[in-house]
């Protein structure tokens, strides 16, 4: 095999090799660099500690922003179209984690707004009684309320936080109409117990594991103090350690302060942790890159195969078109030249011309239908029809060409009456024609094709059986793919477009049915179209 042929047949492996070699060199260079970095003594771990506290604050902010944006983004139409009660259903479907109370203010009618709170257990809105909580709602909503009274709009809605009453910290989202006018607001009162006992410890623990993975358990300590200086959250034991970094939370609970205490880890341990982390990350990225390249090359390989199949399709279709056209031309010339004076001979030539015309029409219909299917423009006209009438009509159209080829098509007449099927009769006829055409083509030395009709389990079955060369089991999963043709010698010698079974599968699937195959090499094949009696459409 020539080098060019080898590359064409093995370009997938060649492509992977071309990627792996430079990638391997890159990884080795990076590993050397990381090993040198590990030996360095001066690591700016103070920056990492500050980054840790900033990340904790960012994660807390992200949690509450995500929760608020999911729960407080109510449609303006609830307020402008007086459908405010729908908010209860909305909140019931999207509970706000970390919120002690959800509430809204309708500013479309009443001068001072209509305050409604959400009862999560009852799943409905109610007017809250006078209390510290309701007063906190009023105070928090007052700035947005004033905007509404002054008829001033906003360019865009953004979350606001009110912490004037520290026992009732509130996140609010203004609801704007199309003109930017505030028509209402939705708010959530934060659950301090949830924040203190669940969210903050979870965020601190997960961030510690990510940013300082080399530190042993208990080596690090973090504490959080409230406005009064009382420790409300602590992870690890800060006793006997000095504070390495301090920071306040940045979105909610902004009067709470976090402190990170110096770990006992040495700079060398920090370097080792950085080395392991970076080496692992490089390995994961390399694996992802190799997988991506392999996938891309596989897609390219499939595209090349599809291109080859299309080329074979053009060649086969050209042959399929030339054969009936040549026959029509020959018999037409014979008639034109008066070579057939006997009426019986004229009728015979006319039948040949008609048969070849039908064959040519079927091929053109398949090509056109394939084009419509590929572009998504294939449409069906469903109506109740008798399957037997469709089958009889197709078999009659095959009588003349099959008689010339000494092929006998038999129809099982003992199936009894069949229920009508809601279908596109022309499309089912085309699918049946394709099955018959395939059965005749691939019958080999056998000259008989058997057709049977039956009804069972709410479906009508049309079965076409031949005693030809058959299909191997591994090929049966592929025969309904476009352009696919079985690669064995006996089958490949028969010309065809590779579209017939693909079109059959699409037509039957559009009717809510399925195409079944029963075949083995040397024993023939049976293709069965199973059509639901109720049809595939409403």
Image (cartoon, grey):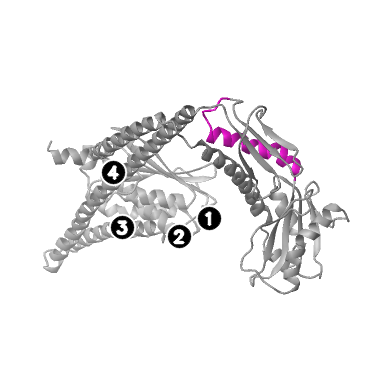
Say few, some or many: other residues with alpha carbon within 10 Å of mark 1 (under 14 / 14 to 19 / 20 or more).
few
Q: Secondary structure at mark 4?
A: helix
The residue that mark 1 highlights is 537
Q: Mark 3 or mark 2: name the one nearer the start of the chain.
A: 3
Which segment is the magenta one? 191-216
Say few, some or many: other residues with alpha carbon within 10 Å of mark 2 (under 14 / 14 to 19 / 20 or more).
some
Q: Which mark is residue 301?
A: 4
Q: Secondary structure of the magenta portion, mostly?
A: helix
Whether residue 312 sits left or right of residue 234 in the image: it is left
Can residue 508 be seen here? The reply is yes
The residue that mark 3 highlights is 367
Q: In x, y percent, where is residue 299?
A: 33, 45
Q: Mark 2 or mark 4: name the one nearer the start of the chain.
A: 4
The residue that mark 2 highlights is 380
Q: Are marks 2 and 1 in contact (CB under 8 Å)?
A: yes
Q: In x, y percent, where is residue 42?
A: 45, 34
Q: Mark 2 or mark 1: name the one nearer the start of the chain.
A: 2
Whether residue 107 sits left or right of residue 515 in the image: it is right
């Amino acid at each position: 095999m020539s080098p060019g042929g080898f590359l064409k047949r093995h370009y997938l492996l060649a492509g992977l090799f071309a990627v792996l070699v430079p990638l391997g060199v890159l990884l080795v260079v990076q590993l050397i660099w990381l090993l040198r970095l590990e030996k360095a003594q001066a690591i700016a771990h103070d920056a990492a500690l500050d980054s840790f506290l900033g990340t904790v604050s960012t994660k807390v902010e992200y949690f509450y922003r995500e929760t608020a944006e999911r729960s407080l983004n109510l449609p303006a139409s609830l307020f402008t179209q007086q459908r405010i009660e729908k908010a209860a259903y909305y909140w019931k479907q999207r509970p706000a984690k970390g919120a002690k109370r959800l509430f809204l203010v309708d500013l479309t009618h009443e001068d001072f707004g209509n305050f409604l709170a959400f009862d999560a257990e009852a799943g409905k809105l109610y007017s809250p009684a006078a209390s510290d909580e309701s007063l906190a709602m009023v105070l928090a909503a007052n700035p947005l309320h004033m905007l509404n009274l002054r008829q001033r709009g906003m360019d865009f809605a953004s979350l606001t936080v009110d912490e004037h009453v520290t026992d009732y910290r509130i996140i609010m989202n203004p609801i704007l109409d199309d003109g930017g006018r505030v028509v209402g607001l939705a708010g959530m009162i934060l659950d301090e117990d949830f924040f203190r006992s669940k969210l903050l410890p979870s965020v601190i623990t997960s961030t510690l594991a990510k940013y300082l993975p080399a530190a042993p358990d208990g080596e690090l300590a973090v504490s959080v103090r409230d406005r009064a200086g009382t420790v409300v959250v602590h992870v690890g034991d800060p006793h006997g350690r000095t504070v390495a970094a301090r920071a306040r939370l940045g979105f909610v609970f902004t009067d709470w302060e976090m402190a990170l205490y110096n770990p006992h880890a040495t700079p060398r341990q920090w370097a080792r942790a950085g080395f392991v982390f970076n080496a692992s990350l490089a390995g994961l990225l390399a694996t992802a890159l190799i997988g991506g390249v392999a996938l891309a090359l596989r897609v390219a390989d499939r595209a090349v195969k599809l291109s080859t199949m299309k080329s074979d399709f053009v060649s086969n279709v050209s042959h399929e078109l030339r054969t009936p056209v040549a026959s029509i031309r020959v018999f037409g010339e014979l008639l034109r030249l008066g070579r057939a004076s006997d009426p019986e001979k004229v009728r015979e030539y006319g039948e040949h011309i008609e048969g070849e015309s039908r064959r040519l029409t079927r091929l053109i219909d398949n090509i056109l239908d394939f084009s419509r299917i590929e572009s998504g423009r294939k449409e069906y006209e469903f109506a109740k029809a008798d399957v037997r009438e469709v089958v009889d009509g197709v078999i009659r159209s095959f009588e003349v060409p099959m008689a010339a080829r000494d092929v006998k098509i038999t129809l099982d007449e003992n199936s009894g009456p069949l229920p009508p099927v809601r279908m596109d009769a022309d499309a089912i006829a085309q699918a049946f024609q394709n099955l018959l055409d395939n059965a005749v083509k691939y019958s080999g030395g056998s000259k008989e094709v058997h057709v049977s009709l039956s009804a069972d389990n709410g479906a009508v079955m049309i079965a076409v059986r031949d005693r030809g060369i058959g299909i191997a089991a591994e090929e049966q999963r592929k025969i309904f793919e476009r352009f696919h043709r079985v690669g064995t010698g006996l089958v490949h010698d028969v010309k065809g477009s590779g579209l017939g079974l693909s079109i059959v599968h699409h037509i039957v699937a559009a009717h809510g049915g399925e195409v079944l195959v029963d075949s083995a090499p040397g024993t023939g094949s049976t293709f069965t179209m199973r059509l639901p009696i109720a049809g595939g459409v409403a």
